[in-house]
Amino acid sequence: MAKKYKTKTQTARALQWTGLNANEAQAFCPKLIVMPNKSGPKKGMWEAQLETRIGIMDVNIGDWMVEVSHGDFFVFDLETFKNTYEVA
């Protein structure tokens, strides 16, 4: 479930990508592109890319998709997200 998170200066909605939550992630972020992973160790999971205003970003398992303003999304790796945001 998408929750609210905040930095010292802003509050943002965020959702962590698991590779299994494609429907939830697409409902949260309409510009998310998901593709089935048909081979390798992640077979049966989904791969994802996010269309942002600066280009297409890969979304890796464990990454966070953050809505920084109305409809403007970015991808943060787990470490950057943990160092930047806290639950609001």
Image (cartoon, rainbow, N blue to C red):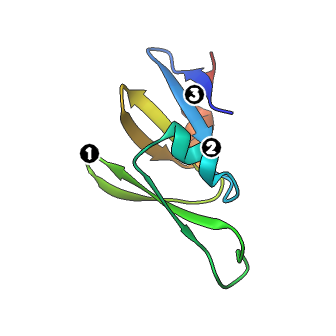
Residue under label 3, please give it. Answer: 85
Q: Is residue 2 left or right of residue 58?
A: right
Q: Please report whichever mark, 3 or 2, sits nearer to the chain's N-terminal start.
A: 2
Which residue bears the numbered disc 1?
53
The residue type indicated by label 1 comes to: Arg
Q: Which residue is mark 2?
A: 24
| Residue at figure coordinates x 57%, y 27% from the top left | 85
Q: Nearer the viewer, mark 1 or mark 2?
A: 2
Q: At label 2, which amino acid type do we have? A: Glu
* Residue 45 placement: quadrant: bottom right
From the viewer's side, name the closer residue of 20 and 66.
20
What element does badge 1 sit on?
Answer: loop
Q: Position of residue 25 (x, y in %)?
A: 57, 45
What residue is rendered at 49% in x and 36% in y?
Answer: 66
Looking at the image, residue 75 sits to the left or right of residue 56; the answer is right
Distance, label 1 to label 3, CA atoms, is: 21 Å
The reply to whether discs 1 and 2 touch (Cβ–Cβ < 8 Å) is no
Q: Residue at x 56, y 49 (%)?
A: 77
Q: Compare residues 58 and 84 and report the one nearer the observer.
A: 58
Q: Residues within 10 Å of mark 3 (few under 14, many from 20)?
A: some
Name which residue lies at 62% across and 15% down.
Answer: 88
Q: What x and y, as percent, mark residue 73?
A: 40, 39
Which quadrant: the N terminus?
Answer: top right
- 54 to 56, vertically: above or below: above
